[in-house]
Amino acid sequence: MTQVRPAAPPARQPPPAQALPARSGVPGRIRVLTGVAAAALALLFAAIAAGAAVAGDGMRVIGRDAGPQVVATAGLYFGLSDMDSQLADVLVMGQGNDSRRQAALTRYEQQRAMANRALLKAFELAGSDQAERRTIESVLDGLGRYEQLAARALLLDAQSGHPAGPPPTEVVRVYREATDLMRLVLLPQAYNLTLESGTIVRRTYDDKTVMLPALRWAVVVAGLLALVCLLRLQVYLTRHFRRVFGPALVAATVLTLVTLVVGGNVLGRDLGHLETAKSDGFDAIVTLAKARAIGNSMQGDQSRFLLDKQRADTYEHTYLDKSQRVLYREAGNLDAYHTQVARGSDDYLGMLGLRLSVATGRPALDAYTRFQAADATFRDLVAAGDTGEAVTARLGPVREAFDAYDKELTALADRHQAVFERAVGQGEAALDELWRLLPYAMGGLGLLLVAGVWPRLREYR
């Protein structure tokens, strides 16, 4: 008997194909395009924020931190050198110059107080930099030793009662010890403080002027990408929903364009402000401060030239070397230098010549020429052996000529200080305004993007 096999079960049919994920349809495409646009907008805001942070850091370092510290330490250098110059003036005056002696002592005390204030300010600005703080403390200690030596020299000088001209040997010996401490220890330390802070400023400026243009281009690229994404989203919605335009997305596109223009413009302006603050402000201020300090030391060398006969040749050569640094002229000795300065030239080299290109007129150069002419007359009197007249010339016409020259340098420095402060202030103000507006722009664009897309997505529910 044949066994009938049961019929084979029917083949299992494959499950019906499920619908494609939502993102493969219109709602999914809208979400993708919206996400890409949001990412592009986030990239735009990130680029603007990064650029603003870089510009703000540059403004802070140059305008509020290391920059003012350089100016403070440059003022310290001037104050210290002027202290030593005033001390030399007092010692060379002798008896019979009571009013001038008192005026020099008063200025000595003023510069001492100014040097102490500059050191305290530099110490405050040094922050947590322990190496710089130790240098400032060393200058403070050295300044205390210098003041003790200066007080001793003044006491011995008053007791000697010598006439105008070189004081007694013991006074000169004590002053030598004081001026060597000043010129070989304190002034180099003060100058090193200026160099250290100046290096920070230059490094910061170099870094920011490289980064800011790159970030500005990043803002432009990110902004254009965001605009393309928004326009693509608008076109897609217009085609699929048969609407001419969406007001919210149009507003978002316009706001994105405004954000791009404003962000790029602020970063560009801040780059310009940073360059102005550094080149026309900071560099000029520091150069003129150094020129003032060196010039002040030059006129101190005139008194030291009278004060210490054994070192007279040394002080004459140091005077020439400093003069060449302020305004260079091809000359092998001081007489030749005087001749070259009096002759005049359009070849401006040296610290003073460096700043004449941005000055109006030539008052500083003319004043410097008159100072060198007064120095030539003063040295002629010394060479003729007329010490009394030489002292009178040194404390009268020579000092007056130097004061007129220094006044011109101060006026130049004040103009550049105004340029510096204005550039820093404008740069910081632009950044503050940008930081205030950026959150509103971000929130506004987010709301507009949602308002433009959400009604279309609801149509598929």
Image: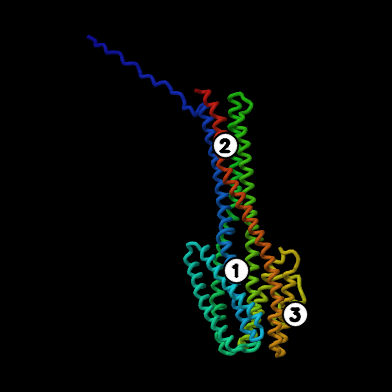
**For the point 74% across and 64% down, which residue is it?**
360
What is the residue that sits farthest to the right in this orientation? 343
Counting from the top left corner in percent of width and height, residue 413 is at 67, 65
Relative to 341, is 431 above or below? above
- Residue 228 appears in the figure: yes
Q: Nearer the viewer, residue 403 or 370?
A: 403
The numbered disc on residue 75 is: 1
Q: Assess disc 2: are there few (<14), some (14-19) or many (≥20) residues with their C-alpha within 10 Å of its C-alpha.
A: many
Residue 165 to residue 373: above or below: below
Give the mark, 1 or 2, whose residue is nearer the N terminus.
Answer: 1
- Marks 1,3: beta carbons within 8 A: no
- Give the secondary structure at mark 2: helix
Tell me the kind of residue under disc 1: Gly
* Quarter where residue 195 is shown: bottom right
Give the alpha-carbon distance from disc 2 to disc 3, as whole Å: 71 Å
> Disc 3 marks which amino acid?
Thr
**Circle 1 Cα neighbour tier, 10 Å, few/some/many (<14 / 14–19 / ≥20):** many
Sequence-wise first label, 2 or 3 = 3
Image coords of residue 386 (percent x, y): 71, 89
Badge 1 element:
helix
Labels 1, 3: front one: 1
User: Is residue 337 at all visible to an observer of this figure?
Assistant: no
Mark number displayed over residue 350: none
Task: Please name which of the two marks, 1 or 2, marks the residue nearer to the observer.
Answer: 1
Disc number placed over residue 445 in the picture, else none: 2
Quadrant of the image containing the N terminus? top left
- Callout 3: helix, strand or loop? helix
